[in-house]
Image: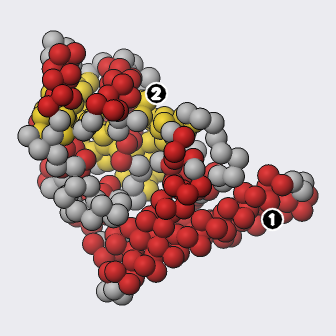
Amino acid sequence: MRVSIVLCEHTLERYEDCQACAESVLTQSYENIELVLVADGNEAVCARFRDEYRDNPHVMIECNDTNVGLLESRNRGAKAASGDIVAFIDDDAIADTDWVTALVSSYESEDALAVGGQMTPAWIAGKPTFLPAEFYWLVGVTHEGFGPGGNKDVSGEVRNTFGSNLSFRRDIFLELGGFDTNIGGRQGDTNLQGGETELCARLGQQFNRQVFYNPQAKVAHKVFEYRTQLSWLIDRAFWQGYSKRGMETFTPDSSTEETAFLRVLLTQRLPQRVRHIFSHPSVYELVQLMTVFGFTLVVGLGYLYGIYKWGLR
């Protein structure tokens, strides 16, 4: 089974991170791979790709004439790919050595149409003490409460995983029409996030199948310092709430994961935190509990703004 991994880059400012990501892909324990590099409207990035990778038989290079955004670039990479499986990873991520091996294992054992894995944190400037694990999704990391039964260490079907650790059988991806480029990025509403959510919801509607989540398929996500600033996280939480309402407009049945997470948060995680504060009082635990309430409120405000913007349809 051949696996093509699509990696997109649009700026030289992130080129070193992109190089590190590419290296993690090219040194996978699984050998039958192809790395598809897509330069998104940046001639300098395209030139660097060609200078450094054109002689590598495991690398294919695609260059967009103009900046078209991440989702359309991913679609181009998937169309150009030759693999049976097409996987996506971002320039700020580092794949575990056995990442592709774990993905392929799930395709073979589960006859899956799509497989995703766990995003782990790579704290560049240290983990912020106020950030609760239930809200790691704000920084692109698999959070507590995700996964089958709300357990991120258990494999099974989920609606979708993060776009930086998500794969499809290529023929299925193409039949679905790829990512909807009206969602986020240069071509759409830049505040609307969740291209993978909409695509995976369509997968469920068209094939009555979900993404198989394998927690052993690990990719580390670099959490840069600016992503740990409270102001950035609040802004992110608001637009995530807005996006959830937007996704319901595009795909009415797309909010099941969020509903399940909210149920786990309110019935399991919050009561556990409250009990822990009473049994082991600490400022650290109190701050995290307040942050859980605060972020939940901000997400809710974003959702209400989404209702104002998108309506109740």
Name the residue at the top extreme.
55
Q: Compare marks 2 and 1 and give the one earlier in the sequence.
A: 2
- The amino acid beneath tag 2 is Asp
For mark 2, does the 10 Å Cα neighbourhood hold few (<14), some (14 to 19), or many (20 or more) residues?
Answer: many
In this picture, is 52 found above or below 131?
above
- Residue position for label 1: 274
Q: Secondary structure at mark 1?
A: helix
Image x and y of residue 236, in percent: 48, 59
Q: Quadrant of the C terminus?
A: bottom left
Image x and y of residue 141, in percent: 51, 46
Would residue 292 appear left or right of 182 to someone viewing this image?
A: right
| Residue 289 figure quarter | bottom right
Name the residue at the bottom extreme.
312
Would residue 137 appear left or right of 102 to someone viewing this image?
A: right
- The amino acid beneath tag 1 is Val
| Residue 268 figure quarter | bottom right
Q: Quadrant of the N terminus?
A: top left
Would residue 221 appear left or right of 40 to someone viewing this image?
A: right
Look at 18% across and 28% down and name the residue there.
44
Image x and y of residue 212, in percent: 40, 49
Check residue 96 in the rendering and tell me which mark sits there, or answer none: 2
| Residue 97 figure quarter | top left
Report how far apart the C-alphas of labels 2 and 1 lie in the structure. 35 Å
Look at 30% across and 61% down and name the residue there.
190
Colour convention of the picture = secondary structure
